[in-house]
Amino acid sequence: MTTALRRYPVLVALCLAALFMVLPFLVVAVNAFKSPAEYSQHGPLSLPGGFYVEGLEDFWQRVDYSQKLLNSVLISGCVAVLAAVLSILNAYAIGIGRIRGRTWVLAFFVLANVLPQEALVYPLYYLSKQVGLYDTRLSVIIVFTVIQSAFGTYLLSSVLGQFPREIIEAARIDGANRWQVLWRIVVPVSRPTIGVLLVFFFIWTWNEFLLPLVMLISNDNQTVSVALGVLQGQRLMDATMTNAAALLGVLPALVFFLVFQRTLTRGIAVGAVK
Amino acid sequence: MTVTVERGARAVGKQPHTGPRRPRTSYALFLLPGVLTFLVVVVVPFLMNTGVSFTEWSGVGSPKWSGLANYRELMDDSEFWASFRHSLFMVVAMAVVPTVVGLVLAAALFDYIGKHFGTKIAAVLRACFYLPQVLPIAVAGIVWSWILAPDNGALNALLKAIGLGSWQQDWLGDPDIALYSVMGVMVWVQIGFPLVVFMAGLQRVDPQLYEAAELDGAGWWRRFWHITLPQIRPEISVVLTWCTIAALKVFGAVYVLTKGGPGGATDVPSYFSFTTFFEKTQVGYGAAISTVLTVIILLLSLVGLRLQTRAEDAEEGARA
């Protein structure tokens, strides 16, 4: 009885803390549907009188949000797939091939993983200008494919290092070459980990800020993150517009979160312990 | 389970090679695309950046060799020192506080909520804490810069509504407060990561340990201190390392929230190097800043890696 009484305050405290975490989202959602007049009259804390969507529409058109979404999906999607492929190839050589010097190669990828992008950003900016890739989505796709694959190689190598050898040996005896072993056996068996990588790569690339900010200057190429960040930096938006921008920025993240929640939490656990 | 599989695999791998076997080198071919792209996108730019840090260069024309001049200048640059001092604040906000709070939250969610109210409620609460982590930092910045706005921001409006009008502040515009405001936002952003990792770690802990301790009359705090903490030490060192590195790299939040202002009060090394590169176009100097940042981060990662392997060894020793 006494323990039961002691349990509820913990539950209440945790619920309050959780509420505090999501409160900013709720406040933004409420204010995105207010008209500027309503906002200036009643302030940010009142509930909206009606369902004012013009602010959202206005913002959508002004920043050409469909284009930004398309850019983000295109870049993040390409990076997720390409980086996963690259990680698989690397990890196959390191984890299963156990090539000579693999510890060093792996250490190399791990260090690249922590390298701050600030140490790459200017040369990448300069080089992409030299080869005519500056301000193209392709440049960002190439750069992030390589950067994300560093983490993928690290994670997949340790997973594949524990891959049951018997299966591979059996396939080899059946006459499969290394290429076939990779795509017909190793990849299907490792699908859960590869799924985690795809989701991570997609969301990480979606959220990237510094390199896309530097590389993508024209409106037609910018991602959601960059467009919103730049707009905020210019301080040209009024309160309702800011809220419209925030809501439209939050929504895709919320969708990913709800769709991928299980993969995400499982993946973080895998990634941390490996 | 995994341990047995691994051992089995190793045993098979060590068997003497019998029968027809092609030479091992062909596996190296699979590494080729990865290594080549890696050279072009990471290694070469990194070496270029390091090289440029020893020169004076505005980004056009050819760089002029200046030896260690940039680094010598950095040592006397109060802006540079201030930015690293702010980095330490970021480490507190993004590594220390989230780890400590995350530990307590994870243990409370796992022990109390998970066991007495069902894992479903625990999962929902965990999701709430994790949500800011999937948000693009630019969007988080927009949300918070509006909440913290001085005139019609939600926080000041709330303070006024509950009769604490005198507590109203220009949260991001006052040089004395701005850094703490950014820190608060970063805690909010970061807290979900340690929480999720620790909750996963707690699942590995043998429940019998808790039962035994409970029988011995150990209270919640003592069990937390003597069982939970030592058992998930590997997770704690991973989280601390990762979060510290993330804190040193903070850029987007500062760009969107304060642009390093007011008057450099929230400037951090990555933002400092960014403005030096692209606004002041002192590329050599910017490269020197980012090189120093890189060296610090690499050193920290090595320390973190050591801690991690030591924690894992200790854990394995305890298990054996």
Image (cartoon, rainbow, N blue to C red):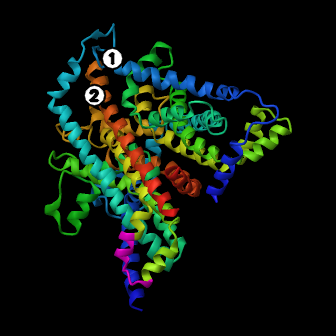
**Residue type, mark 2 in image:** Ile
From the viewer's perspective, is B161 left or right of A152?
left
Q: Nearer the viewer, residue B5 or A50?
A: B5
**Label 1 secondary element:** helix
Range of residues picked out in magenta: B215-226
Q: Main secondary structure of the magenta part?
A: helix
B260 in relation to A268, above or below: above
Provide residue A120's location: percent of width, then percent of height: 40, 26
Gap in Å between the C-alphas at discs 1 and 2? 11 Å
Q: Secondary structure at mark 2?
A: helix
Vertical position of residue B232 compared to residue A126: above or below: below
* Residue A101 seen in the current view: yes
Return the x and y of residue B115 as percentages of the image width and height.
50, 77
Residue B225 image point, x, y percent:
35, 69
What label sits on residue A256 in the rendered view? none
Image quadrant in which you'd find residue A184: top right
Q: Name the residue type under label 1.
A: Val
Q: What residue is pinned by disc 2?
A: B289
The residue at the point 38 percent across, 57 percent down is: B191
Quick check: is B225 in the magenta stretch? Answer: yes
* Residue B140 lies within the magenta run: no
Please name the residue that numbered disc 1 is placed on. B52
Closer to the camera in the image, A77 or B139 = A77
Residue under the image location 38 percent in, 22 percent down? A122
